[in-house]
Image (spheres, rainbow, N blue to C red):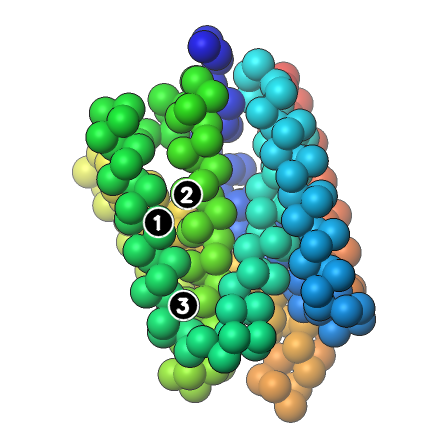
Amino acid sequence: MQRFSKVPQVTLAFWVIKVLTTGMGEALADYFDHAFNPIIVVAISGVILSLTLWWQFSASRFVAWRYWSAVSMVSVFGTLAADAVHVVFHVPYWVSCLGFLFVVIVTFVVWQKTESTISILSVTTTRREVFYWVVVMGTFALGTAAGDMTAVTFNWGFLISGMVFALAFAVPLLINFSFKLQSVILFWVAYVITRPFGASLADWLALPKIRGGEGWGTLPVSLALVGAIAVFVSLSRKQLKV
């Protein structure tokens, strides 16, 4: 049994880093997908993800670099997995959304029935941490499919999609803040929305103009976001001393 929380406090820094990791994962996965053999990329990213999760699980308490390294790799792998479902197996984005949503809901139900809570504040044991990371991976895949669905299937484009998801992300946070709530459900709603929010904006910046982007390139955007993540994690680590 672990006595200390294995996840960070939910602060402004938490949400900023979370959004940055979603954008980074989207851009970096797109770069590797087009620069190298997709099958090899998925296999290698899966190995790296496993190593970062092992590093995270081996800690006895929250350690900033371990936690955010795992989140970053979940973002990359989740993008690759969601894209593979659509590109390789030709599954429509709306079907992917429903499938990943089902997985997330089932995980929440089992987690609630097993532990009597789905709050991240309760992630102090190995079993709860397993539930937490299954949900995190599911939400990343769900968010990736949702962002692609609105941008491509609904033909909203990446910028409009990003703006819509930004508003959707702000709503549960404003409700919590305005009414001084600490709603677990509203937290997870906001958490899921961070993925299509950050990914849509990253796509808008990185992809060529012919595809509705600004044409900055997936690799430059990825590196810029990696740098931003490192800066914010360093700052949060100094404040929390972890």
Residue 128 screen position, x and y as percent: 40, 26
Local crowd at mark 3 within 10 Å, few (<14), some, or many (≥20)? Answer: many
Q: Are marks 2 and 1 in contact (CB under 8 Å)?
A: yes
Location of the C terminus by quadrant is top right
**Residue that label 2 marks:** 135
State the residue at coordinates (24%, 45%): 175
Which mark sits nearer the N-terminus, 1 or 3? 3
Circle 2 SS class: helix
**Residue that label 1 marks:** 104
Q: Is residue 22 left or right of residue 165?
A: right
Q: Are marks 1 and 3 in contact (CB under 8 Å)?
A: no
Task: Check the image and report above or below for 234 versus 16.
Answer: above
State the residue at coordinates (31%, 55%): 102
Q: What is the count of numbered marks?
A: 3
What is the distance, in whole Å, between disc 2 and disc 3 at their CAs?
16 Å
Q: Amino acid at mark 3?
A: Ser
Foreground of the two, 162 or 239: 162
| The label number, if any, that marks residue 96 in the structure image | 3
Task: Check the image and report above or below for 180 versus 136.
Answer: above
